[in-house]
Image (cartoon, rainbow, N blue to C red):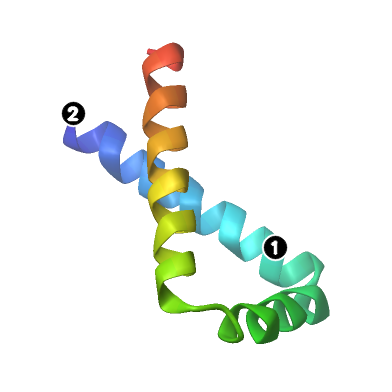
Amino acid sequence: MPRDFYAALCLVLVIEGLVLFAAPKGWQNMMREAQKLDPRTIRIFGAAAIGLGLLTLQFVH
């Protein structure tokens, strides 16, 4: 189990790194827009992403 967890974290780093490497200006623009959002809205997006990720993980396994 821990090995799978670490592998998943590594994949997250790779994906995040690809976004930063491929589109740094787009990422900066997205962060500027995110600063304008209410923290509650960002929290809701985060919760939705967690839920979607967990649901997708259930289908994969």
Q: Position of residue 47 (x, y in %)?
A: 38, 50
Query: In the picture shown, does residue 16 fall above or below 32?
Result: above
Is residue 35 placed above or below 10 in the rendered structure? below
**Residue 32 at what x, y percent from top left?**
68, 86
Q: Where is the C terminus found, in terms of image quarters?
A: top left
Is the residue under label 1 in contact with that under label 2 (CB below 8 Å)?
no
Quadrant of the rendering where the N terminus is positioned: top left
Front in this rendered view, residue 25 or 36: 36
Q: State the residue position of label 2.
A: 1
Q: Earlier in the sequence, mark 2 or mark 1?
A: 2
| Residue 39 found in image quarter | bottom left
Q: Amino acid at mark 2?
A: Met
In this view of the protein, which residue sits in the foreground, 44 or 21? 44
What residue do we see at 80% from left, 66% from top? Answer: 22
Residue drawn at x 60%, y 53% as measured from the top left = 15
Residue count near mark 2 (Cα–Cα under 10 Å), binned few <14, some 14–19, many ≥20: few
Mark 1 lies on a secondary structure that is helix
> How far from the left and from the top, in percent, is residue 43?
39, 64
User: Quadrant of the rendered structure where residue 19 is?
Assistant: bottom right
Q: Is residue 34 above or below residue 3?
A: below
Horizontal side of residue 31 vs 2, given as left or right? right
Secondary structure, mark 2, is loop
Name above or below for residue 4 compared with residue 50. Answer: above
CA distance for labels 2 and 1: 28 Å
Question: Could you say which disc has been placed on residue 47 in the image?
Answer: none
Mark 1 sits on what residue?
19
Viewer-closest of 16 and 41: 41
Q: Residues within 10 Å of mark 1 (few under 14, many from 20)?
A: few
**Residue for point 47% across, 46% down:** 49
Three-letter amino acid code at the position of disc 1: Val
